Amino acid sequence: QVFTINMVEIKAQPSAKVKNGAPLSIICHADISKKNDFQLRHNFTIFKNGKLVLTISSDKREARYGIPMARSSDTGDYECTVEAAGKMKSSNSLHVWVTGMTKPILTAEKEDVLEGEVVKLRCELPEEEPPLNFVFRKIKMNSTPKEKHVTELYRNFSTTEFSVEDGDNILYFDCFGRRYVNLELETSEPSNRTLVTVKEPFIKPTLNAKPSSNITEGDRMQIECSTVVARIRGIEIILQKNKTILNSVEDERLLRYSTVATVEDSGEYLCKVEQGRASKTTKLNVVVAELFPKPVLTASAFRVDEHKELTLSCSISGFRKANFSILRRNSNGDLQWLKNSRNLTMRVYVNNSGSYICRAEVKGIVKESKPVRINVYAPVSKPTLSVVSGLPEVVLGKPLWLICRSVMGTPPITFTFYKENKVQKIVVNDTYATFLDENIGRNDKGGYKCDAKNHHSSGTKASNILNITVIVPTRNASLGSNPYGEVEDGSGTVFLCSVKEGSWPIHFKIFKKTDREDLVYETSENADRILWHKEVMKREDTGTYYCIASNRANVDVKSQPITISVILAAWQKGIIAAFVLIPIAGAIALTLWWFLVKKKTAKRPSMEMSRSAFGTNLTSEKLTRENNDGDYYSGSSYIEDGENHMKSTDENKGPDLESAEVEYTEVEVSTLDPHRAPVQKATETVYSEIRKANN
């Protein structure tokens, strides 16, 4: 029983794209090769979008999944797998598209409603799978349908509500569904149309004006609004004009509003009846004829100097019989009565500035004129010009702020700034103005001036001329010293700190670098350099020094550091050398003396024996050599020196040398002239003696 599964195919009948409601079959076919003719069972499995929809076992090589009425929910990707005797093979994926959607079903909660109520609707798409989009429509005769869109992600039905408004008598409702398939929007056919009948809870209100809608100022006007209502409870009537509520009543069928008519009462009135959500309105246009025009207020001047006279006059065009009064509106908005007259003349002060109006009354109708603004001006005082920072100076490269101030004068005041008689800026303000000058030169003196004026007839007042000082910041500080580098201990040093430029006075500081930067000298001078004489330098003054210079510009400049080393003076070196070399020389001399004495003592016995045998010859030899050679001491000097050395040696040697000392004493018998031979050092005498011994 040898076989192999060559291929598995899947197909749709009649096609992979069918209309909603049409029959659809998904067919899975297995292509199998056998070596012999034997019966083989096949297990067919069909999936839709990865979910199992059919499993069947058959000895046939084909399986069919039938859908009598295809719905849009059957749209998807289908795949077939065949298994036989442990062998398995799958088909490719087949996309099936069922076009169109089922017809939705619409139901209404009530078929009879009152105005102001709501209609609740339910729309269902049977046999369709979410997500779905539902569209509800409210259809009214001779008007565009109103739509509401609702998206349902997890169910195939939706609900919504429509309010019943004024004028809704007979309403129709329907719905339809939508969804996206393969990035294409599918729309179902409309649902069944549902009819809803609307009943009125009350009739449209009636609005009237008495005695009529055309009346004259001064006449009493009465407006009435009424309605017919089935249920009085909860009814409300409201009267409005320009969205302003004039009157209202509740639980009543009639509203009245009465007033003395004026021109301002002309316009459109609206009566509104409300009960629950129901609302109906009626409009009425009322025209009020003018009895007399508004008065006009005139003034002799609108800008008046303080202490001058002002005349106000009130009049009505073509009408003279009226009661006039003149009033002033205070800063808080209140009106202050001044006089019951057509004319008013008064001497004004600054506090009389304000808005004035005129009132006229005829037959109880009061009208006001447009306000007239009167400004009373006090003259400006002589302005003062100063620097905002206080002092009349500015740092080079920094801006200069000036302020011009006038203590007296009614605002607004116009300030004009000048620099060297050229206008720089014009400012309108209350009591002061500022000016910024950013173009300050090194040799700039300023020559600033300002003037002030307002609407007083006195004219312009000018300030004094202001000159400023330009402060040049210090720059390029340097520090030097004499002597430079090394200074002997105890001697003096001169430090020179200087700057390349800077306005005087300049403050100089000299520091020595330590853990805390010690200040060793500071001074202020009207110069660009200072000398500091430090008379005595000590070893602890060794270190690094730098200087800092600054002036009123408050810009510190720091020099490069210099290093000063305090060394020993010459006399200090001599003392140290003496203390070091003298002990060394003494040690060397002592060592040499000890060596010579030891060597001389070792040869003493042979010398004494020679002297005993040839005493006479030795004496005459000495005398002869002293006469011929002036470089040697006399015999007497030599013997004394030798005797002293020998004594020192004999004391160390002990009693064994006493006999030699006696023999040596016997040799000293001759006397010589000490003036014949030059005096030489003892070391040379010892040397001569050694030479004689060798000889």
Image (spheres, helix red, strand yellow):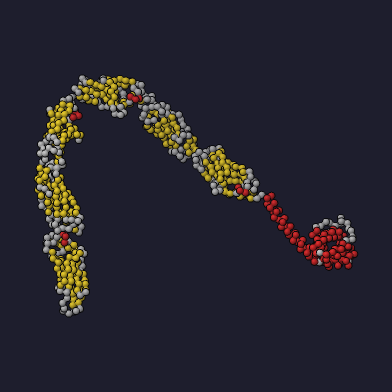
User: Which part of the image, by quadrant, shows the C terminus?
Assistant: bottom right
User: Viewer-proximal residue, 99 or 393?
Assistant: 99
Q: Is residue 659 visible?
A: yes
Question: Which of the image's four quarters has the N terminus?
Answer: bottom left
On screen, 96 above or below 206?
A: below
In-image side of 649 versus 325 (left or right): right
Taking the view exactly as shown, the residue that stands out farthest to the bottom is 36
Q: Where is residue 465 drawn, in percent x and y?
A: 46, 30
Q: Is residue 162 above or below residue 590?
A: above
Residue 43 pos. (x, y %): 18, 71
Residue 153 vs residue 111: left or right?
A: right
Q: Residue at x 58, y 41 (%)?
A: 530
User: On screen, 548 above or below 317?
Assistant: below
> Which quadrant of the figure has residue 379?
top left
What number of labels is visible?
0
Rendered position, 37 above or below 587: below
In this rendering, does residue 460 appear at all? no
Q: Residue 376: x percent and y percent? A: 34, 25
Q: Is residue 168 left or right of residue 348?
A: left
Of 438 and 183, the residue lying toward us: 183
Q: Residue 185: name its quadrant.
A: bottom left
At x 12% / y 54%, what residue is drawn?
105
